[in-house]
C-alpha cells in the first residue's frame, strides 16, 4: 500500500536562499532570544545577518574553502545559529556534534568527516579536542564561543567576526551574497552523524534541498500566527531540532528563544511563554508523571476533583476525536474541569502554548490523549535523520491519536510485504558519507529508503508498531514489539527507564531503572532505613512495590507479550558507557550484553511460566 502527501508545494531550493529571504521578509527585532545575566535579550534579524556575514568572511580569510567541513560542538545558543549560517553562506558543509559526546567519539566524527575547523562552546568542549587533536591531521582551527580565548582554542568567535569585519566592504558584501547564492539544491549542506542503535557512526549527507523541501512542506502543517515564540532546548545537533526548531522557525518568522539547559526548561517556559514547543516524548512523560504525583499527593478531596476532571476531559476528548462537539452538561463540566485542574497545567507551560510537537521516539497514546483532553494538543510526527527528518505528522486539521499523522507534501510512503515502512521523495538523504555500500543497503534502485521501522497505513494515517531490528522473536517463535510495552511502563512515576529483553528466550523479561526520587520518597514513608541505593534495591518491600507498579501498568497485552520477570538496575543508562545513542535511544543489544548476568539469572532454574 502506498500513501502520498501529494505533490511538492515548492520547487527545489537552498538553505542560503531561505536565510536571506527570511531575514528580509520578517526583519524581526527578536529573531533570536538568549539569557544574559538571567534576563532574555533579543537579537534582531539584521544583527544576526551581519554577524553571520562577518563570521563567514572570517572563515574565508582563514583559508577555509568551499566544500570544506567544519564541526560545531556546542549547546543551543545564538552562536550555534551564527556558525551554521556562516558555514552555509560560504558554501561549507558543517558537522554538528552533540556536546555530551565523549572525546573519542567526537574525534571519530571530526576525523571521518575531515573537518578543517571546529566551533566549540567553551573550555570544556575545547578540552575534548585537545585530547585528540594529534589524531586529527585535517583540523587547523578551533574557534570558541567564549568571550575570551582559553586553553585549546585558536581564536574566539568575536575574533573571527572582527577578522571578517576588516574586509566587510560594500563590494565584498555583494560578492559574499552572490557567491552564497551559487549553492545548488543538490550540494551537501551538512553531515549529521548517526550511530543508530548498533555499529559505528555514519555521516548522513543532507543536501540543501533535503532540508529546504522538508521545511517548506512542514511550514503548511501548522497555522503559524506570525507572533509565535518557540523554546529551543532539544540539541541542535539532532535533525529534529535542526530542521523544525531552527530552519523552520526562521522561515515562518517565529522568534527562537534558547533555554539555558534542559534542567531550566520548566523555568524558561514560564519566562518565555512559548506558543510552540518541540520535544521528544520524555518531556511529556515527565509532565504527565508530575501531574499524577501532585494529584495523588493531595488530600482525598483534591484527588476526587482531579479524577472527576480527568474523567470529564476524557469523555469530552472522545467526542471531539470522533468529529463531534460536546454540548450541554458535558460542555459545562469541561469548563469547570479546565478552571479547577487543567488551567494549572497550562499555566506551567507559560499560558500561551498553542501546540506541542513530539518526535524522535514513539509517544504513548495514553499520554497523548491526556494532554489532548487537558486542552494541550501534541502533534506527533515521525521521521529519521536520513529523511530530513519529517515523513509524516499529525496536524490540527488531520489529527489521530495512536498515529504519526499523514505524509507531508512531496513525501511518498509504502508498506513493504514484511511490514517495513519505505519512503521516497526530496527528503531522502544523498547517502552515507564515504559509505556507498551502506547507502545501497537502505536506498533501493527505485529510490525507496528503507526505514527499519514496522508500520501500518489506515486512511493515509501512518502508525509505527516497532523497529524492525528490535522485534523480539522468542524461542517459541512469538514476535514481540518491545517499544509499546516499554512506553506503557515508563508512564509510571516510579520508572525512569524500561527495556524489554527476550530474543531467542523462552519468555520476555524487563529491566527497570527506578525513578529514584519517587522510590526514596516511598522508602521514607515506609520508615525503611538504607545507606545506599544498591542496598535499597535488595529489600523485598521495595522489590514488591516496583513489581506492583510495573506489572500493574501493563494491560491489553497478549499473554506471550507480558514480561514474566523484572530486574532492577541501580544506575541509569548512559551515552558514556555506550548504552544510549546521543539522541538517548536505548542500544538494546548493548544492554543485553552489559547486563547479561542479570538477565541470565532471571531464566535460571525456573519452570517455564504457564501460557507461554
Image: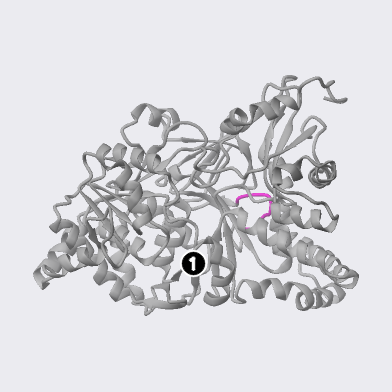
Question: Where does residue 131 sit, x and y in percent of width and height?
Answer: 32, 43
In the shown orientation, is residue 452 left or right of residue 398?
A: left
| Magenta segment main secondary structure | loop
Q: Say above or below: 336 vs 438.
A: below
Total numbered labels placed on residues in the image:
1
Q: Nearer the viewer, residue 11 or 114?
A: 114
| Residue in view at x 43 percent, y 48 percent | 388
In the shown orientation, is residue 495 left or right of residue 193?
A: right
In the shown orientation, is residue 379 left or right of residue 193?
A: right
Range of residues picked out in magenta: 398-404
Q: Say above or below: 357 vs 255.
A: above
| Residue in view at x 75 percent, y 59 percent | 322
- For the question of whether residue 468 can be seen, the reply is no
Q: Residue 428: within the magenta?
A: no
Kind of element beneath mark 1? loop
Q: Residue 403: within the magenta?
A: yes
Question: Where does residue 506 sit, x and y in percent of width and height?
Answer: 75, 22
Question: Where does residue 513 sit, x and y in percent of width and height?
Answer: 68, 44
Q: Nearer the viewer, residue 539 or 449?
A: 539
Which of the 4 image quarters holds residue 271?
Answer: bottom right
Disc 1 target residue:
259
| Residue in view at x 77 percent, y 39 percent | 538
Q: Nearer the viewer, residue 190 or 460?
A: 190
Question: Where does residue 132 sit, x and y in percent of width and height?
Answer: 31, 41
Image quadrant for the N terminus? top right
Image quadrant for the C terminus? top right
Which of the 4 image quarters holds residue 2?
Answer: top right
Q: Nearer the viewer, residue 318 or 78?
A: 78
* Label 1 CA crowd tier, 10 Å (few <14, some 14–19, many 20+): many
Colour theme: one colour
- For the question of whether residue 126 can be seen, the reply is yes
Amino acid at each position: 500500500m502506498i500513501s502520498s502527501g501529494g505533490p511538492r508545494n515548492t520547487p527545489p531550493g537552498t538553505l542560503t536562499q531561505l536565510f536571506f529571504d527570511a531575514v528580509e521578509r520578517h526583519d524581526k527585532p527578536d529573531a533570536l532570544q538568549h539569557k544574559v545575566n538571567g534576563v532574555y535579550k533579543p537579537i534582531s534579524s539584521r544583527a544576526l545577518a551581519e554577524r553571520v556575514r562577518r563570521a563567514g568572511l572570517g572563515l574565508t580569510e582563514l583559508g577555509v574553502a568551499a566544500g570544506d567541513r567544519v564541526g560545531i560542538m556546542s549547546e543551543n545558543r545564538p552562536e550555534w545559529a551564527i556558525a551554521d549560517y556562516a558555514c552555509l553562506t560560504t558554501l561549507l558543509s558543517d558537522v554538528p556534534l552533540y556536546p555530551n559526546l565523549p572525546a573519542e567519539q567526537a574525534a571519530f566524527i571530526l576525523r571521518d568527516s575531515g573537518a578543517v575547523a571546529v566551533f566549540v562552546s567553551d573550555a570544556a568542549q575545547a578540552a575534548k579536542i585537545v585530547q585528540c587533536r594529534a589524531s586529527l591531521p585535517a583540523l587547523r582551527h578551533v574557534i570558541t564561543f567564549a568571550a575570551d580565548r582559553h586553553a585549546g582554542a585558536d581564536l574566539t568567535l568575536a575574533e573571527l567576526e572582527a577578522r571578517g569585519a576588516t574586509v566587510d566592504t560594500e563590494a565584498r558584501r555583494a560578492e559574499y551574497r552572490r557567491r552564497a547564492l551559487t549553492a545548488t539544491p543538490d550540494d551537501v549542506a551538512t553531515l549529521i552523524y548517526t550511530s543508530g542503535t548498533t555499529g559505528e557512526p555514519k555521516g548522513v549527507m543532507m543536501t540543501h534541498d533535503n532540508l529546504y523541501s522538508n521545511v517548506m512542506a512542514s511550514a503548511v502543517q501548522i497555522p503559524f500566527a506570525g507572533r509565535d515564540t518557540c523554546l529551543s532546548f532539544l540539541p541542535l545537533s539532532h535533525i529534529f531540532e535542526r530542521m523544525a526548531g531552527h530552519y523552520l522557525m526562521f522561515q515562518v518568522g517565529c522568534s527562537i528563544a534558547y533555554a539555558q539547559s534542559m534542567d531550566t526548561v520548566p523555568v524558561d517556559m514560564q519566562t518565555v511563554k512559548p506558543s510552540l514547543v518541540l520535544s521528544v516524548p520524555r518531556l511529556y512523560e515527565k509532565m504527565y508523571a508530575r501531574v499524577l504525583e501532585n494529584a495523588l499527593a493531595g488530600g482525598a478531596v483534591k484527588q476526587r476533583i482531579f479524577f472527576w476532571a480527568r474523567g470529564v476531559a476524557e469523555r469530552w476528548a472522545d467526542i471531539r476525536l470522533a468529529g463531534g462537539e460536546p454540548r450541554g452538561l458535558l460542555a459545562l463540566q469541561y469548563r469547570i474541569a479546565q478552571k479547577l485542574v487543567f488551567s494549572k497545567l497550562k499555566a506551567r507551560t507559560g499560558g500561551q502554548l498553542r501546540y506541542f510537537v513530539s518526535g524522535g521516539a514513539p509517544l504513548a497514546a495514553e499520554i497523548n490523549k491526556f494532554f489532548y483532553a487537558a486542552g494541550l494538543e501534541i502533534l506527533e510526527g515521525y521521521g529519521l535523520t536520513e529523511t530530513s527528518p519529517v515523513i509524516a505528522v499529525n496536524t490540527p486539521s488531520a489529527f489521530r491519536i495512536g498515529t504519526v499523522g499523514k505524509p507531508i507534501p512531496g513525501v511518498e510512503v509504502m508498506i513493504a510485504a514484511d511490514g517495513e515502512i519505505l519512503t521516497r521523495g526530496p527528503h531522502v538523504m544523498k547517502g552515507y558519507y564515504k559509505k556507498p555500500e551502506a547507502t545501497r543497503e537502505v536506498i533501493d534502485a527505485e529510490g525507496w529508503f528503507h526505514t527499519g521501522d514496522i508500520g501500518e497505513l489506515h486512511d493515509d494515517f501512518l502508525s509505527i508498531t516497532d523497529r524492525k531490528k528490535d522485534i523480539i522473536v522468542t524461542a517459541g517463535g512469538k514476535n514481540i514489539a518491545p517499544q509499546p510495552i516499554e512506553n506503557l511502563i515508563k508512564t509510571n512515576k516510579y520508572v525512569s527507564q524500561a527495556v524489554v529483553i527476550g530474543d531467542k528466550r523462552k519468555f520476555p523479561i524487563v529491566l527497570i531503572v527506578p525513578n529514584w526520587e519517587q522510590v526514596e520518597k516511598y522508602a521514607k514513608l515506609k520508615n525503611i532505613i538504607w545507606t545506599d541505593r544498591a542496598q535499597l534495591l535488595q529489600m523485598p518491600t521495595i522489590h514488591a512495590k516496583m513489581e506492583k507498579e510495573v506489572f500493574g501498568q501493563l494491560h491489553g497485552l497478549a499473554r506471550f507479550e507480558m514480561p514474566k520477570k523484572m530486574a532492577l538496575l541501580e544506575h541509569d543508562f548512559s551515552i558514556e558507557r555506550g548504552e544510549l545513542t546521543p539522541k538517548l535511544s536505548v542500544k538494546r543489544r548493548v544492554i543485553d550484553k552489559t547486563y547479561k548476568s542479570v538477565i541470565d539469572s532471571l531464566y535460571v532454574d525456573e519452570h517455564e511460566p504457564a501460557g507461554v
